[in-house]
């Protein structure tokens, strides 16, 4: 079922704030955090993101994935943006992060914000806002997030061991997301971000070793094999509309055409199959649950006040 994204989602935003109980103190995260200190902050980020995605729509997936990879390690603190030094190998050089894209968009927004209001807007907030704006650009739900995150002072490659690999089954995903406070339903909703973007052959070629895999459509297996014939870095879209935010991802799972093991397991498992069916049938429900889960994710272990800093350059700790 397709709904009017704008009208339905704007109503949803109000409902989400009520459902989530999002209230913030004077010194905590707030929706209007920059209204006095940098009133143009949100417009600058949005314009930067939209301009970049108009030139390359595939970067929307990169920005959403960057936000997820940031929040699941050390919380939403922009640790994924830090460059390695001779004394420290940072998160972004982990094998799990080598395919991340869109760093230049964050840099561009940060440069403009530093000119407009130096030392005010954190890189962590820029990532969260950029992911939100990328989802909107791709046709996804409209939602807002509280701002006021501070940037972390730690970024180490060994921490990325906590990112979920593409080989996990449904039970493992439920356990891993549960450690961050997410329900199985929220995990399946967040997985729907795979409606954007591609996976590399190296992430799914192990599935092709079992020619009789009951959870892999035989014709789709041929498609994946054809992709992998071009090498480990060859790319396979997660669904047929790689740059559009919709519920096609879940319909692909029903057809046994999920790309990763961690995708298809959501339909293969009785614990999550009903949620997949629900989102495949009702895009509005997916959008509503996704935006709630994204707001919740954007609040993971955020640093406030003296717990963090506002970096002058997103690639370097002050």
Image (cartoon, helix red, strand yellow):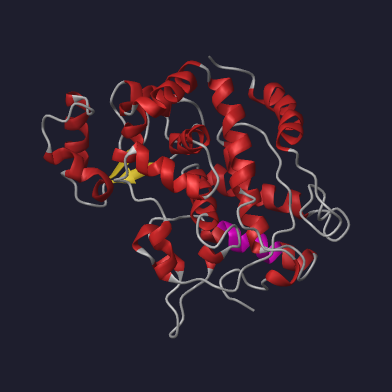
Q: Is residue 133 magenta?
A: no
Residue 85 in picture, x, y percent from top left? 46, 81
Of 166 and 9, nearer the camera is 166
Q: In which quarter of the image is residue 135?
A: top right
In the image shown, does 98 or 281 lie closer to the viewer? 281
Vertical placement of residue 263 versus 164, above or below: above
Q: Can residue 260 be seen in this view?
A: no
Quadrant location of residue 304? bottom right
Q: Can residue 7 be seen in this view?
A: yes
Whether residue 103 is situated above or below residue 243 in the rendered picture: below
Dominant secondary-structure state across the stretch colored magenta:
helix
Q: Which residue is drawn at 64% across and 79% down?
A: 318
At a point 26% along the width and 47% down the height, the residue shown is: 234
Q: Nearer the viewer, residue 12 or 28?
A: 28
Q: Residue at x 67, y 66 (%)?
A: 111
283 vs 29, left or right, is left
Q: What range of the chain is rendered magenta?
A: 105-112
């Amino acid at each position: 079922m397709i709904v009017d994204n704008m009208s339905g989602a704007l109503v949803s935003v109000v409902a989400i704030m009520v459902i989530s109980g999002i209230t913030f103190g004077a010194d905590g995260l707030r929706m209007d955090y920059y209204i006095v200190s940098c009133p143009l902050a949100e417009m600058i980020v949005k314009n930067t993101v939209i301009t970049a995605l108009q030139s390359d729509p595939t970067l929307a997936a990169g920005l959403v994935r960057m936000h997820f990879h940031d929040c699941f390690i050390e919380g939403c603190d922009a640790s994924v943006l830090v460059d390695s030094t001779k004394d420290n190998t940072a998160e972004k050089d982990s094998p799990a992060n080598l395919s991340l894209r869109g760093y230049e968009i964050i840099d561009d927004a940060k440069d403009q914000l530093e000119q407009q209001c130096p030392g005010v807007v954190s890189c962590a907030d820029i990532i969260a806002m950029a992911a939100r704006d990328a989802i909107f650009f791709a046709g996804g739900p409209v939602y807002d997030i509280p701002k006021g995150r501070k940037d972390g002072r730690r970024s180490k490659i060994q921490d990325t061991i906590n990112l979920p690999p593409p080989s996990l089954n449904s039970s493992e995903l439920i356990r891993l997301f549960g450690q961050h406070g997410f329900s199985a339903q929220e995990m399946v909703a967040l997985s729907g971000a795979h409606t954007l973007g591609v996976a590399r052959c190296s992430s799914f070629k192990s599935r092709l070793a079992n020619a009789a895999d009951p959870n892999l459509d035989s014709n789709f297996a041929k498609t994946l094999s054809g992709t992998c014939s071009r090498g480990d870095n060859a790319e396979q879209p997660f669904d047929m509309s790689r740059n559009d935010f919709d519920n096609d991802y879940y319909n692909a799972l029903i057809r046994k055409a999920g790309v990763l093991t961690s995708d298809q397991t959501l339909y293969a498992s009785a614990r999550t199959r009903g949620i997949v069916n629900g989102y495949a049938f009702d895009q509005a429900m997916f959008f509503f649950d996704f935006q709630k889960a994204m707001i919740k994710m954007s609040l993971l272990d955020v640093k406030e006040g003296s717990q963090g800093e506002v970096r002058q350059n997103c690639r370097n700790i002050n």
